[in-house]
Image: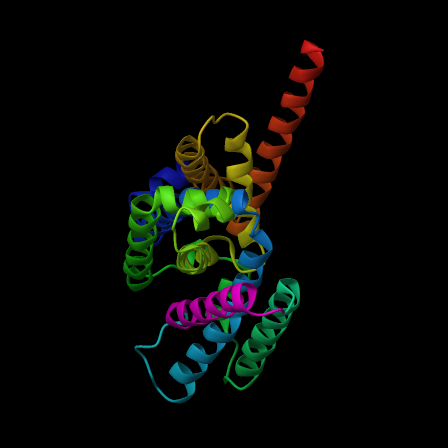
């Protein structure tokens, strides 16, 4: 702990990592709550895995064709938004099963990403960090991009709070009341896509859904309204990402995996505690 605090004051990469965790937690708290309530975590998972196509292609063009301005995060944003829109359109306006298109996009996205990685000379260290998460590799450029995405997610999530609430809990009533459900459902999926991109930097594609849902699940035990769940899950995410960074730093454990394990242990403790409390009442 002492070494971490001492190095935090000296090294920019640790400061960037800490700020990244905070930024990701804010978006995670707001959009993660909508994802859990609407029960679209499988959609978010499909989006998360499809972003590998965008990251792989961005790294390929930057390495092979010298497009230095192209960041893997740019590719991730593009791939996530395209995937979200395709899933939303298929879900709303076609008769195709939603799980079928999600599975197809998941597989195709991963396959395209792997093909681009195979055609990129050298070992793609940066891309592997996005796959498994490495918050310590965040650059200042990435930090500004994530801050912009985070701001957009927060403003939209708060500004359209009631509309998203109606879409999540009773879309039929919202439609009868004159709300353009399709528009706000697509907007919610796009915001979910942007949040996934932010969280991928923290814990990686493989474990992004755990960070998107576990803090919200814990907050659900102590919240009586949606906004309380959002606020508490955001604070819990900040605690978990910071704890993951601190715990993993000195023994050099993978930060993303450590963060998820802390989330999982906390969730297990809360579930067991809640079960014992109910049994005591009974």
Q: Nearer the viewer, residue 20 or 231?
A: 231
Residue closest to the eye, 100 or 41? 100
Residue 65 on image: x %, y %: 38, 89
Q: Is residue 37 above or below residue 115?
A: above
On the image, the x and y values in percent for residue 55 come to: 46, 72
On screen, residue 265 versus residue 181, left or right, reads: right
Image x and y of residue 122, in percent:
51, 81
Residue name at image x 38 percent, y 59 percent? 138
**Residue drawn at point x = 57 percent, y = 63 percent:** 46
Q: Nearer the viewer, residue 273 or 187?
A: 187
**Residue 266: horizontal and vertical position, in percent?**
58, 32
Q: Eyeballing the image, is 64 above or below 55?
A: below
Q: Is 77 inside the magenta-drawn segment? A: yes
Quarter of the image with the C terminus is top right
Q: Quadrant of residue 69?
A: bottom left
Q: Is residue 157 visible?
A: yes
Q: Main secondary structure of the magenta part?
A: helix
Task: Give the position of the N terminus as an image quadrant.
Answer: top left
Left or right: 124 in relation to 110: left
Q: Residue at x 64, y 32 (%)?
A: 268
Number of numbered tags placed on the structure image: 0
Q: Which residues are magenta?
A: 73-95
């Amino acid at each position: 702990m002492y070494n971490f605090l001492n190095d935090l004051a000296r090294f920019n990469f640790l400061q960037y990592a800490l700020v990244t965790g905070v930024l990701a937690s804010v978006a995670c708290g707001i959009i993660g709550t909508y994802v859990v309530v609407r029960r679209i975590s499988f959609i978010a998972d499909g989006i998360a895995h499809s972003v590998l196509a965008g990251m792989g292609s961005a790294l390929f063009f930057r390495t092979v064709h010298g497009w230095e301005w192209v960041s893997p995060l740019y590719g991730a944003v593009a791939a996530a938004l395209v995937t979200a829109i395709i899933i939303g359109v298929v879900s709303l306006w076609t008769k195709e099963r939603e799980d079928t298109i999600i599975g197809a996009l998941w597989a195709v996205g991963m396959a395209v990403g792997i093909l681009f990685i195979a055609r990129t000379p050298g070992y793609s260290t940066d891309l592997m960090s996005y796959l498994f998460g490495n918050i310590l590799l965040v650059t200042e450029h990435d930090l500004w991009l994530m801050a912009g995405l985070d701001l957009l997610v927060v403003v939209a999530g708060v500004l359209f709070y009631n509309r998203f609430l109606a879409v999540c809990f009773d879309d039929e009533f919202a439609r009868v009341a004159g709300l353009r459900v399709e528009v706000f459902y697509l907007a919610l999926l796009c915001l979910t896509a942007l949040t996934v991109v932010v969280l991928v930097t923290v814990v990686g594609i493989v474990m992004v859904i755990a960070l998107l849902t576990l803090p919200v699940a814990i907050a659900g035990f102590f919240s009586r309204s949606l906004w309380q769940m959002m606020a508490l899950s955001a604070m819990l995410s900040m605690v978990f990402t910071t704890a993951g960074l601190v715990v993993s730093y000195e023994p050099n454990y993978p930060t993303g995996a450590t963060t998820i394990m802390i989330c999982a242990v906390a969730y297990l403790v809360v579930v067991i505690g809640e079960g014992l409390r109910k049994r005591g009442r009974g």
